[in-house]
Amino acid sequence: MTPNGRALGLSKGSRLGVFSRPLMRFDAIRRVLDTELLVFRPDRSKARTLDGVIGWGHKPTARVARDFAREHGLPYFAIEDGFLRSVGLGSESPPLSLIVDSRGIYYDSTAPSLLEDWMASTSTDDPLSEHGLLHRARNCRERIVQARLSKYNHAPEDLPPYLLEARHPVVLVIDQTYGDASVDLGGASAAQFSGMLEAAFDENPNATVVVKAHPDTIAGKKRGYLDRAQLPRQARLLGEAVNPVSLLSTIDRVYACTSQLGFEALLLGKPVTCFGIPFYSGWGLTDDRIACPRRNRKRSLDELVAAALILYPRYLDAFTGERVEVESVIEHLALQRKQFTENTGRIWCTGISLWKRPFVRRYLQSPGNEIRFFSSAKSLNSALGSRKPKLLTWGNREYESLRVVAEARGLPLLRMEDGFIRSIGLGSDLTVPGSLVVDSGGIYYDPRSQCDLELLLQTRVFSEAELEQAQRLRAAILATGISKYNTAVDRPFTPHATAGQSIVLVPGQVEDDASVRDGSPVIRSNSDLLRAVRKQLPKAYILYKPHPDVVSGNRRGSIDKSAESLCDQIVTDVALGRCLEAAQEVHTITSLVGFEALLREKRVVAYGLPFYAGWGLTHDQLPHPRRQRRLRLEELVAGTLLLYPRYYDFRASAFCSAEHMVTELDRERKAGGSPTQLPWLLRRIRNLAVLAREMVKVEPYFRRRV
């Protein structure tokens, strides 16, 4: 349990009174309190059975809970959002961090809080003196700034031109909503806001002064303290929603009353002047215009980060709801922001079939972006006008037509395809994918041009952290047996080879698939592949595994009778992982099975030009003149599975990591068995029902523009 948990004195058997119906229904509360024993609106007779009372902060809505606790001598536990809360706003996203404070609450400067107690501690067992904790705090601070994280993480990074062009120094004055509890309890008032604005001009006579309005003020939901009409003529009002870290990166000095933006400015090393008493003032890190007598010692920035971001909040996993450490939430939020940044702006698509559009929209989502689908490159071109969107198509569909439009208009062109860890079930059965790739250079199965994956593998200097993550991912894949489609039932498999006979796995492919057409200039059929393998290895035991799409009847690729006689065993209902375990080597045209064999350190012979060949890990029958680098297996895994694809968990409505997708597919497979056991029509009806739900599903993180 975290230090926060020990300070509260709660256990799984604690009984807590609740007077708020929304709080009672809030599942995350039970997780952060480690108890299921919540009593709704307890009366006087139940008071003695309680270990405490919970309420939302010190706001007026929690007054009944605080009064009940005071009347019956019970501890009151204030609940509040943490400082790294969620992707979207509170009304749109569940919280990933919550604060539980038995002493007070961080924004109430009239009384101590757990956060203030840790910061003010002078005891020999100071919780902020531990070297490992401060090392974590420094790493968290650097990662937060690098990933541009804030309390909410839905705002775009684009700043208004006037701010980018402003004369330096640039001073930011932060407004807040009128009557906010953090203002009233933080020792501030309307007079402080007026004085703060006046000081910003007086103390920075040659600066550009920008007033940051609160989002609720801009939306017309609440009024602020710095009314637009009362601002000096030379003040610039920033009303747009922008990423706080992007904004603060352009600022030279910050003036705040109690806003969390002041804390985030400190993370970036910006000087902050406080006209109220926020949790981060009084520790020698800020220029304070109001003193708090209880705060009489100096703290370092890393000590503040350790207290405010590691010890004080409790964090929840975005997918499981289980308790996690702050680093896990930071990486989750960083991943969402990374994908949002890649998806920013307009993205106009063609060559995307109707059934794919709902999930393609999810993979391309970003706050405020525009995603449009067109029936053809011609109709897209007609609608362009003077707009400059990114263009996107699925694989080779409409690619040549769209390329002509992109080159004529000077527009970026992207291609989308299934990822390498995809689903439980086939794409041809309309199964929603757990991973896709978006490529700006080409596409991974077409070696005629350099795709983003090839460029990444050719040039990337992989970090130790990436290589360690690649090792963990590879171990997870081997432990679960997860592959691309995962259609066969996982059961033991023993080939009928004689003792000492070499076992060779030959994976079949869809013969009209682009990876065969574009990636193999010599051998283009499964029958020809089997003939070539038997010619090379006349005494080997050949296992032939047809492609799942061919077995299901959805695609073309059956072998002829003469080739069938070259196989020692044809396996259709055995999981790929079991076949790979049994084989010593794999011979393939361009199949992903060759890559999965490399994960298991099997010998791989490539007769075509797959993405994983040419790096010194395979035995290649054709030359790869562009691929000059020799890779380690972990580097190939890091580039191919960690950095190139994007993964999406539709249950949690969030982008996820490759490791999480392996875990999720393994869970789904164990829960539901093999989907190809159902008749073809039932498979499609089932998957269409999933897509129908997806089409009407409301985005949980932000309102999307269509």
Image: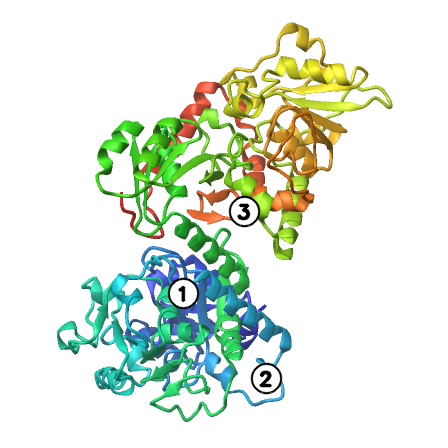
The residue positioned 56% from the left and 68% from the top of the image is 139
Q: Is residue 376 left or right of residue 566?
A: left
Q: Which quadrant: the N terminus?
A: bottom right
Judged from this view, the residue extending furthest toward the right is 499
Crowdedness of circle 3 by 10 Å Cα count: few (<14), some, many (20+)?
Answer: some
Q: Which residue is mark 2?
A: 126
Q: CA distance from mark 1 to mark 3?
A: 24 Å
Q: Disc 1 or 3, which lies upstream in sequence? A: 1
Farthest residue to the left: give it: 229
Image quarter of residue 610: top right
**Residue 618 image point, x, y percent:** 70, 33
Determine whether the residue tagged by mark 3 lies in a helix, strand or loop.
Answer: helix
Mark 1 vs 3: CB contact within 8 A = no
Q: Report the Cα–Cα distance between label 1 and label 2.
A: 28 Å
Binning the other alpha carbons within 10 Å of mark 1 as few (below 14), some (14 to 19) or many (20 upward) gives many
Q: Choose mark 1 or mark 3, whichever is in front.
A: 3
Would you call the spot at circle 2 few (<14 residues within 10 Å), some (14-19), or many (20 or more)? Answer: few
Label 3: which residue? 643
- Kind of residue sitting beneath label 1: Ser
Measure the C-alpha gap from mark 3 to mark 2.
41 Å
Q: 485 and 196: which one is in front? A: 196
Disc nearer the start of the sequence (3/2): 2
Q: Amino acid at mark 3?
A: Leu
Q: Which badge, 1 or 2, is on the more N-terminal residue?
A: 2
Whole-percent x and y of residue 631? 67, 43
Q: Nearer the viewer, residue 207 or 152?
A: 207
Residue 446 disc label: none
Q: Which residue is mark 1?
A: 150
